[in-house]
């Protein structure tokens, strides 16, 4: 069985065939967690989770939603990317007494969106990202759920913020592309987990990182509809394609793909407290 630990079937890219895809995955035993990026996409993820037994949800505010950004930075697939929000009570109201919500995120830091801003605007945007990140760290502690972290080459800065806020819970470093040094720092905390996406099929750049990631700290994901793995690169990504991520990891670690699927399936259940 396959468990896509990070998908976005709650986004506009799936508006035309979302129900068809979800029914197919329900029949085929493909499990997934839909990840919130703002209030509306978080709400949609929760609706899907409540409707389908093979789906769960996270509620979160992506760092790109914390400040006004240049239009040329936006992705045409995400109709909600223009929304600028703050983490507040309505996010937490979604979480109250809903067992299908298993995490807060994706949240974190991403300064790649800031390159077209003036220096003073960049500093303000960084400050806003950090403020909203801290709010979600505190919410994860409040609700005793893991964090799903979106960090673009800012792993050490995020680790410092987590430490400063005395975060003792679980965290998933989503779409990991860090160095061996980044990995070593993250693995010092037994509650932190590494999730690999289809980008690992594009080259051998992350092979050594994957080799050094313990099997019991490993998750797989698609981040669909984005970054479809080879052989689907350039097409809309889908949760079923997480099998290509499992295949690549199996090759690197010299184990069977079935073993990787089983291990990552069980790891995802364990990290997010999912009982089947």
Image (cartoon, grey):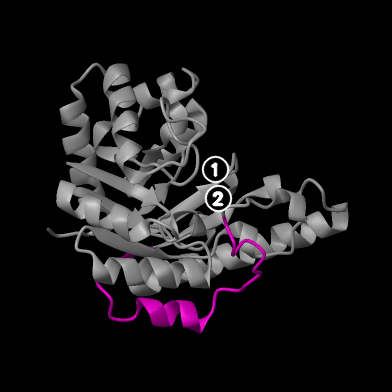
- Residue toward you, 40 or 118: 40
Visible residue check, residue 188: no
- Residue toward you, 94 or 227: 227
Callout 2 touching callout 1 (CB < 8 Å) = yes
Q: Is residue 32 left or right of residue 81?
A: left
Visible residue check, residue 141: yes
Give the residue pinned by disc 1. 155
How many dots with numbers?
A: 2
Q: Is residue 145 above or below residue 148?
A: below
The quadrant where residue 3 appears? top left
Q: Residue at x 41, y 25 (%)?
A: 231
Q: Residue at x 79, y 57 (%)?
A: 123
Give the residue pinned by disc 2. 158
Q: Residue at x 39, y 78 (%)?
A: 94
- Whole-percent x and y of residue 178? 52, 33
Q: Secondary structure at mark 2?
A: helix
- Whole-percent x and y of residue 247? 29, 25
Q: Is residue 148 left or right of residue 71?
A: left
Range covered by the magenta-colored residues: 78-103
As drawn, the label of residue 33 is: none
Q: Secondary structure at mark 1?
A: helix
Q: Residue at x 48, y 65 (%)?
A: 60
Main SS, magenta region, reads loop
97 within the magenta span: yes
């Amino acid at each position: 069985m396959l468990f896509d630990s990070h998908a976005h079937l709650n986004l506009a890219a799936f508006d035309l065939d979302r129900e068809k895809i979800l029914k197919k995955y329900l029949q085929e035993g493909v499990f997934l967690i839909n990840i919130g990026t703002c209030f509306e996409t978080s709400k949609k993820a929760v609706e899907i989770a409540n409707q389908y037994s093979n789906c769960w949800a996270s509620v979160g505010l992506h760092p790109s939603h914390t400040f006004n950004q240049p239009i040329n930075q936006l992705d045409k697939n995400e109709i909600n990317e223009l929304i600028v929000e703050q983490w507040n009570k309505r996010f937490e109201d979604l979480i109250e007494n809903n067992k299908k919500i298993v995490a807060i995120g994706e949240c974190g830091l991403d300064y790649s969106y800031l390159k077209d801003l003036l220096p003073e605007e960049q500093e303000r945007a960084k400050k806003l990202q950090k403020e909203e990140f801290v709010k979600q760290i505190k919410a994860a502690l409040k609700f005793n759920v893991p964090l799903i972290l979106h960090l673009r080459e800012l792993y050490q800065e995020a680790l410092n913020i987590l430490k400063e806020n005395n975060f003792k819970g679980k965290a998933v470093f989503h779409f990991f592309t860090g160095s061996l040094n980044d990995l070593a720092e993250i693995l010092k905390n037994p509650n932190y987990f590494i999730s690999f996406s289809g980008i690992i099929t594009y080259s051998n750049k992350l092979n050594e990182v994957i080799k050094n990631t313990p099997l019991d700290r490993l998750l797989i994901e698609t981040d669909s509809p984005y970054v479809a793995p080879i052989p689907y690169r350039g097409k809309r990504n889908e949760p079923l394609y997480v099998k290509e991520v499992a295949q690549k990891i199996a090759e690197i670690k010299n184990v069977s793909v079935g073993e990787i699927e089983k291990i990552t399936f069980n790891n995802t259940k364990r990290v997010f407290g999912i009982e089947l």
